[in-house]
Amino acid sequence: MGILDVLSAKNNTTIPERYKNMSVEEMENRVREIKEKFGERLFLPCHHYQKDEVVQFADATGDSLRLAQLAAKNDKAEYIVFCGVHFMAETADMLTRGDQMVILPDMRAGCSMADMADMEQTERAWKVLQETFGDTVLPVTYINSTAAIKAFCGRNGGATVTSSNAKKMIEWALSQKERLLFLPDQHLGRNTCVDLGIPLEQMAVWDPIHDKFEYDGDLENVKVILWKGHCSVHESFTVENVEEIRRTKPDMNILVHPECSHEVVKESDYNGSTSYIIETIKKAPAGSKWAIGTEMNLVKRIIAEHPDKEIMSLNPNMCPCMTMNRIDLPHLLWALETIEQKEQFNQITVDQEIAKDALLALDKMLKIV
């Protein structure tokens, strides 16, 4: 049974039928009414990848860490309705006070990348790494991971990273120990390490399904161990997509997220975090042309916000992130009405012991960057 199965057993994840029969106008009016009623007691952060029907009500938009930090700074909010995915709401719960309630509108909103590293797999891998390399490995995890994986890194002296600060955090990690274990996204780890001048020949992939290294050569030469995980959205951008743009629109800039494969990043003109992508387009001159390789809801929003530029998705056939897309207007309204009715559905709470260790990893990152 996975984490979302456990949570589903503890929470009502089936939205009542009446929400399916309400008009968009009715739902929007009710959301506005409840937000006005609760005022500063309610905080509604929305991740960049959320649908417009939800983002229109956001008190703040941003990446997962920024939103969790904003929630932590919000002294007046009693209820934080986090429009994102499960690991983001976990981080918000760990960074906020115990008397603040973090709610996820749809408990099915998970993250396939975060789910690619569970504790049983990680403990098995760590045992092999210790036997193979001795005490020379420091674990770091992308913020897109479960609280339990963050806690594992915290217990073992490691830290969390974001796509914005990955270079600085990897430099720090390799100043502490000879080797690095990067969880759970191999692509962000590989692309960042290449940017830092670490050759691909010094990177091994750990396959958690088959408990083995994917590496040709002497393991003594390995500096970076990459967990075999990925973002299903960003891995769907291909070199063929890049080549098609180069062939049909040779004057178009290609801008991608570093969760894309190394081959795609290498063939692109620019790569960087979600914030970097947004700021790059914002600063670009009118008339400039861009193909963007990131989540489709965000790309569509960027297109709408910059009519003076020609912007498209690097893969026009790309679908939005399916788990992010689970949070829609009906689920948002349902979450708000349960608060109004003093019911406690879909609350995210992280075990105190896990939170204590996970905060070690988060705090280490926040102090360094």
Image (cartoon, rainbow, N blue to C red):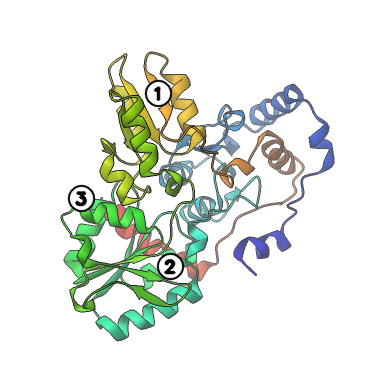
Identify which residue, 73 or 190, lies in the foreground: 190
The numbered mark at residue 151 is: 2
For badge 2, the amino acid type reads Ala
> Is label 1 or label 2 in front?
1
Q: Residue 264 location in percent, x, y?
A: 33, 45
Against 180, residue 123 (above or below) is below
Earlier sequence position, callout 2 versus callout 3 = 2
The numbered mark at residue 209 is: none
Q: Is residue 65 left or right of residue 11?
A: left
Which element is circle 1 on? strand
Against 81, residue 313 (above or below) is above
Earlier sequence position, callout 1 versus callout 2 = 2
Residue to which mark 1 is pinned: 311
Distance, label 1 to label 2, CA atoms, is: 40 Å
Q: Residue 51 location in percent, x, y?
A: 57, 33
For badge 3, the amino acid type reads Asp
- Mark 3 surroundings within 10 Å by alpha-carbon count, few (fewer than 14), some (14 through 19), many (20 or more): few
Is residue 279 visible in this depiction of the protein?
Answer: no
Q: Are marks 1 and 2 in contact (CB under 8 Å)?
A: no
Distance, label 3 to label 1, CA atoms, is: 26 Å
For badge 1, the amino acid type reads Ile
Which element is circle 2 on? helix
> Is label 3 or label 1 in front?
1
Q: Residue 39 location in percent, x, y?
A: 61, 31
Which element is circle 3 on? helix
